[in-house]
Image (cartoon, rainbow, N blue to C red):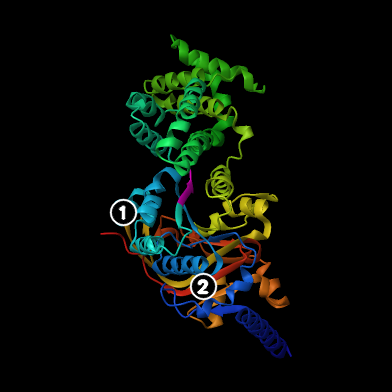
């Protein structure tokens, strides 16, 4: 009897699995190839999925998979030729992708130089070069009145923003500002510097418009916003670093402060002032207006230097310094969405492209799977795609990528970029379920699923999630659980991948 019951349960599970695969198969569109230049007859049915869509987010499960990059190239060609898309938006710093845009528009420089200039090794590849060359060829055809454009939406690099402003200064014969921009490259700018910054851009804007053109003027003006985004991003990084140092030892640090003060004589003023503040606020809230960031940082530095001479008490002093650094950097952070700042900024930059820079343009976004996704945390947008979906609704169509096995490029624990290979996907994962559908590569629109498929897509399932790095000793950490139907409108599956090819 028991054996019959077990057998019945096993049959039920198998039946359920079979029904799921049938459901996924019915909603799937087989793709004959991932390589561009092979027509679009197999992609024609995508038109229904993309009706009314203005932004397509194309993800990637790693930052170095050749077939994924090739498929994104092919998808962009399809969107251009069949749906009127004209903008390729890349998860790269806006200031660093100007060379890409100048190449595809005017043929300036070499395509390899332009690809390297965007700054990330992840997209300094043959696959990106192939896409840029296709865009350049398209733009040289006089019948194509609407030209294709490249714009970066990222905002992490404060220094390259200032290089962009220096370049504009040279065009305007304003080399006298070079020192100012150099000071703005790395430092946390003061309010006075930011005010001077805004005055310079405001003053030069009409001249930029006259000498370089309207597009350049819009970009010049926007770069002020991108620079501020980058500054805030750096502040947040410092804050997270300080928080990670201070919080695990916070209670222990406060307990030790009074003992440190009592046990030390002839303590330097800065050290004593810093410790006294901690004693005073052990059980009292620190008022935000009482925090002078520079003063706190100087006290923290004094304590760190003093710690070097304090033998077995050195660690206790260092932790006091870490708490002061945390308090200094925490000021104003409550007004920032610390986790989502970069993604929100990228979404705002993409919406600016559509609204102001290239009004009405349809955009394909190229970024990591998570960035294009509609991931929410506590019902609030967390990723770029979620912010876009909040603004655009169904006009935003995010596509995630999945692969079953194969290779990709990533940086190892030794800091070296190399090719990696991973085995077949784990059982029960999205990747394994897609493999069982039976196609080498396919597109699936989750909106076309039947009840069985919709139920599956609304549940958590594991999938591979690599970025720019890989640690073979922690292979399990590169599996993440997602709800596919909530995060993506659809996905593209590729059974086997190879590493992307670096530019020689």
Q: Residues within 10 Å of mark 1 (few under 14, many from 20)?
A: few
Task: State which region is magenta.
Answer: 151-156
Q: Compared to 98, does 500 lie above or below?
A: below
Instruction: Depth check: give the residue in front, 89 or 486.
Output: 89
Query: Where does residue 405 sit, x and y in percent of width and height?
Result: 44, 72
Query: Where does residue 339 sit, x and y in percent of width and height?
Result: 58, 44
Residue furthest out toward the front: 142
Element type at marker 2? strand
Q: Compared to 123, does 312 lie above or below?
A: above
Dot placed on the residue nearer the N-terminal end, 1 or 2: 1
* Mark 1 → mark 2, Cα distance in angstroms: 28 Å
Task: Tell me the number on the disc at residue 416.
Answer: 1
**Nearest-to-viewer mark from 1 and 2:** 2
Q: Residues within 10 Å of mark 2 (few under 14, many from 20)?
A: many
Query: Where does residue 73 sit, x and y in percent of width and height?
Result: 44, 66
Q: Quadrant of the C terminus?
A: bottom left
Specify the quadrant of the image occupied by residue 406: bottom left
Instruction: Depth check: give the residue in front, 396 or 340.
Output: 396
Residue visible at 57% across and 51% down?
Answer: 384
Query: Where does residue 120 sit, x and y in percent of width and height?
Result: 38, 51
Task: Tell me the number on the disc at residue 493.
Answer: 2
Residue furthest out toward the top: 266
Residue visible at 55% across and 43% down?
Answer: 345
Q: Quadrant of the N terminus?
A: bottom right
């Amino acid at each position: 009897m028991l054996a019959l019951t077990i057998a019945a349960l096993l049959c039920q599970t198998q039946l359920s699995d079979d029904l799921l695969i049938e459901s996924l198969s019915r909603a799937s569109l087989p793709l004959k190839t991932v390589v561009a230049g092979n027509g679009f007859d197999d992609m024609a049915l995508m038109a229904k999925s993309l009706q009314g869509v203005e932004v397509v987010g194309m993800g990637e499960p790693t930052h170095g998979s050749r077939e994924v990059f090739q498929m994104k190239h092919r998808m962009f060609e399809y969107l251009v030729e069949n749906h009127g898309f004209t903008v390729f938006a890349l998860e790269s710093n806006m200031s660093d992708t100007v060379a890409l845009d100048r190449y595809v528009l005017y043929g300036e420089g070499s395509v390899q130089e332009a690809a390297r200039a965007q700054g990330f090794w992840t997209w300094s590849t043959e696959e990106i070069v192939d896409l840029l060359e296709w865009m350049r060829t398209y733009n040289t055809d006089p019948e194509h009145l609407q030209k294709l454009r490249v714009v970066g939406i990222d905002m992490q690099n404060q220094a390259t923003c200032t290089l962009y402003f220096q370049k504009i200064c040279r065009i305007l014969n304003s080399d006298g500002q070079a020192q100012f921009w150099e000071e703005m490259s790395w430092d946390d700018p003061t309010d006075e510097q930011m005010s001077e910054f805004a005055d310079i851009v405001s003053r030069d804007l009409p001249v930029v418009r006259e000498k370089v053109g309207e597009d350049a003027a819009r970009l010049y003006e926007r770069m002020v916003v991108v620079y501020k985004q980058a500054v805030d991003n750096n502040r947040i990084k410092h804050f997270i670093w300080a928080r990670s140092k201070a919080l695990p030892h916070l209670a222990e640090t406060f307990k030790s402060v009074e003992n440190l003060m009592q046990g030390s004589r002839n303590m330097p003023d800065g050290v004593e002032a810093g410790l006294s503040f901690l004693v005073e606020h052990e059980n009292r809230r620190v008022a935000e207006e009482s925090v002078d960031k520079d003063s706190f940082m100087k006290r923290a530095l004094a304590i760190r230097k003093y710690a070097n001479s304090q033998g077995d008490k050195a660690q206790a002093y260092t932790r006091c310094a870490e708490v002061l650094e945390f308090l200094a950097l925490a000021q104003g952070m409550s007004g920032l969405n610390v986790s989502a700042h970069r993604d929100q900024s990228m979404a705002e930059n993409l919406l600016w492209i559509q609204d102001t820079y290239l009004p009405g343009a349809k955009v394909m976004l190229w970024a990591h799977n998570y960035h294009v996704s509609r991931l929410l945390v506590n019902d609030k947008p967390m990723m770029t795609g979620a912010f876009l979906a909040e603004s655009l609704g169904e006009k935003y169509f995010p596509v995630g990528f999945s692969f079953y096995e194969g290779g990709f490029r990533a940086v190892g624990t030794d800091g070296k970029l190399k090719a990696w290979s991973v085995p077949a996907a784990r059982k029960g994962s999205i990747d394994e379920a897609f493999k069982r559908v039976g196609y080498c590569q396919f597109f699936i629109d989750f909106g076309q699923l039947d009840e069985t498929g919709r139920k599956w897509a609304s549940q958590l399932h594991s999938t591979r999630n690599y970025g720019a790095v890989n640690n073979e000793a922690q292979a399990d950490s590169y599996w993440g659980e997602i709800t596919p139907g909530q995060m993506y409108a659809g996905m593209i599956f590729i059974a086997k991948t190879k590493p992307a090819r670096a530019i020689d």
